[in-house]
Image: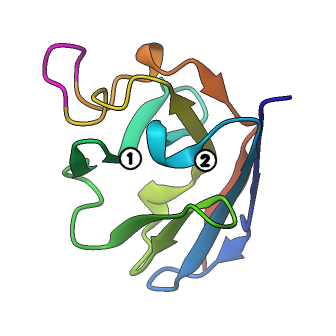
Amino acid sequence: QVQLVESGGDLVQPGGSLRLSCETSGFILELYSLGWFRQAPGKEREGVACISERPATVIYSDSVKGRFTISADNAKPTVYLQMNNLKSDDTAVYYCAADSRSELCGSWYYGVLEPREYGLWGRGTQVTVAS
């Protein structure tokens, strides 16, 4: 059974850090494109970061570049999102996603960090940045 389960969301002050985890099961992590997306109230879901091994690719949205780091541990198998220097604009529900097209992450043909291209989703975890 394919599952993605996010955890690690919390209330944090501006400038603080959080690490989100996405535990996966039912598929081979290193063969997939893996992504983190977020959706704030009243806004569309947007891509935050993606990672793939085949080919080796890591992509970040401009809004989080230099502050967030995506990584994957194939042995666990879990996907992480380390978030530093958090801002109020980062407040959103964060979703983990995966797709069997390993070339999807970084593919301009499909639209980089396009949520509609990812076929597997978790239920999300809430991140709130406020003082």
Report if residue 130 is visible in the image: no
Which range is magenta?
A: 107-111
Q: Amino acid at mark 2?
A: Tyr
Determine the secondary structure under disc 1: strand
Q: Residue 114 falls in which quadrant of the image?
A: top left
Q: Is residue 86 shown above or below 38? A: below
Give the main secondary structure, helix, strand or loop, of the magenta stretch: loop
**Three-letter code for the amino acid on which mark 1 is drawn:** Val
The residue pinned by badge 1 equals 48
Measured in 3D between alpha carbons, the distance from the residue under mark 1 to the one under mark 2, in whole angstroms, is: 9 Å
Which numbered disc covers residue 2? none
Number of marks in the rendered image: 2
Q: Locate the N terminus by quadrant.
A: top right
Image coordinates of residue 8 in percent, x first then y, are 73, 68
Place of residue 108 in the rendered image (x, y in percent of width and height, measured from the top left): 13, 22
Q: Earlier in the sequence, mark 1 or mark 2?
A: 1
Residue 56 in sight here: yes
- Tell whether 45 sits left or right of 53: right
Indicate the secondary structure of the residue bearing disc 2.
strand
- Contact (CB < 8 A) between labels 1 and 2? yes
Question: Which residue is painted at 69% across and 66% down in the image?
Answer: 76
Single out the residue that lies furthest toward the right.
1
Q: Identify residue for label 2.
A: 94
Colouring style: rainbow
